[in-house]
Amino acid sequence: MPPPLAPTAEAPRDPAVDPRGLCDGRAENARIQTTGPRGETLTGVCRRGANGWLQFSAEPRR
């Protein structure tokens, strides 16, 4: 039997958020803060896309 894996320093991450549903039920230009796929904080707003649906638009990092 193989030895057990050593514990790592990283905390378990939450599952990545699907950006397609972030603006469901929100107002246009609503500000949203969420966790990205690599654990980073994403901030953005809901903007109306060319198809008329609200879409999450991430703000550029500074």
Image: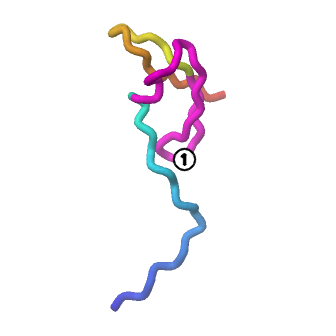
Query: Residue 32's image quarter?
Result: top right
Coordinates of residue 3 in the picture (x, y in percent): 42, 88
Location of the N terminus (image quadrant)? bottom left
Q: Is residue 45 above or below residue 8?
A: above
Query: Residue 31's image quarter?
Result: top right
Horizontal side, residue 51 vs residue 26: left or right: left
Q: Residue at x 41, y 29 (%)?
A: 21
Q: Residue at x 52, y 60 (%)?
A: 12
Magenta segment includes 10: no
**Tag 1 residue:** 39
Q: Is residue 1 above or below residue 35?
A: below
Horizontal side, residue 5 vs residue 8: left or right: left
The magenta stretch is 21-44
Callout count: 1
Q: Residue at x 43, y 19 (%)?
A: 55
Location of the C terminus (image quadrant)? top right
Q: How is the image coloured?
A: rainbow
**Tag 1: amino acid:** Gly
- The secondary structure type at the circle numbered 1 is loop
Q: Residue at x 44, y 84 (%)?
A: 4
Coordinates of residue 50 in the picture (x, y in percent): 36, 8
Coordinates of residue 52 in the picture (x, y in percent): 37, 8
Binning the other alpha carbons within 10 Å of mark 1 as few (below 14), some (14 to 19) or many (20 upward) gives few
Coordinates of residue 14 in the picture (x, y in percent): 50, 51
Magenta segment includes 27: yes
